[in-house]
Image (cartoon, rainbow, N blue to C red):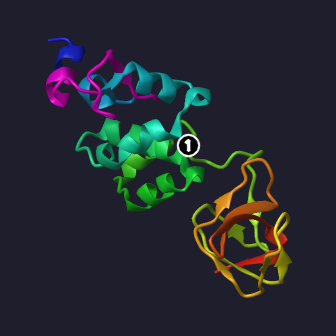
Amino acid sequence: MNIERELGKRSNHKCELCTSTEKLEVLEVQPAKNNGLDGSLLACSICKDQVENPDNTDPNHWRCLNDSMWSEHTPVKVIAWRMLSRLRNEGWPQDLLDMMYLEEDELEWAKATGEGAPSENQIIHRDSNGVVIEAGDSVVLIKDLPVKGSSMIAKRGTAVRRVSLDHENAEFIEGKVDGQQIVILTKFVKKL
């Protein structure tokens, strides 16, 4: 029996990542260490394109991983881990990664392509003490800060929860202070 039919039976003829029934194709999980069903999954053309071409990645498409990361099939878990790792700076994927469990050999396979490893040109945000700040972290202001374009002053000691990172500048983070979204310089915060 051919692999596409077997994968169709296994997945109930749906994409094993996003459950779409449109334009399904076999996606062989690289590096191919397992053959057949143990090394492939059935994916829609959108998922397959975004897995294979990181520049085409649409973070909102991958919210489906909230369900598919719990698959009993290793190739599905491996791709889910890789895509969550690729998108970890969005905030929500890091939360899913923290919940996800892979056996040692599954994790080794997931990491085999280098997905999730920090790149040398990756922007790293650090607080005033040099501690790394990640998306979703909480920080506290270490000085009174006037907010540009407003008469508001963000007071020293104010906690800013669930900050987001500027992906182009390591000195900027964003967060809400008194209900207003503001940009904060990392040299004026301390991670909680």
Question: Quadrant of the image for the N terminus?
Answer: top left
* 17 inside magenta stretch: yes
Circle 1 packing at 10 Å, graded few (<14), some (14-19), many (20+), is: some
Instruction: Report if residue 72 lies within the magenta region.
Output: no
Of all residues, the one furthest to the front in this rendering is 151
> Is 39 located above or below residue 143 in the figure?
above
Q: Do we see residue 109 in this rendering?
A: no
In the rendering, at what x and y percent does residue 143 appear? 83, 83
Q: Is residue 174 above or below residue 53?
A: below
Query: Camera-side residue: 82 or 192?
Result: 192
Instruction: Name the residue rendered at 78%, 60% in the picture.
Output: 172
Q: Is residue 180 visible?
A: yes
Q: Decide: is 50 above or below 182.
A: above
How many discs mark residues in the rendered view? Answer: 1
- Residue found 57% across the figure and 65% down from its top: 136
191 to the left or right of 28? right
In terms of secondary structure, where does tag 1 sit?
helix
Amino acid of disc 1: Arg
Measuring from the top left, give residue 72's x and y in whole percent. Answer: 22, 44
Residue 70 vs residue 173, the one in the foreground: 173
Q: Is residue 98 left or right of residue 69?
A: right
Residue drawn where x is 83% and y is 83% of the image: 144
Residue 92 in the image, given as x and y percentages of width and height: 48, 55
Residue at position x 21%, y 23% from top?
7
Which residue is label 1 attached to? Answer: 86
On the image, the x and y values in percent for residue 111 come to 50, 44
Q: Quadrant of the C terminus?
A: bottom right
Stretch of the chain drawn in magenta = 7-32
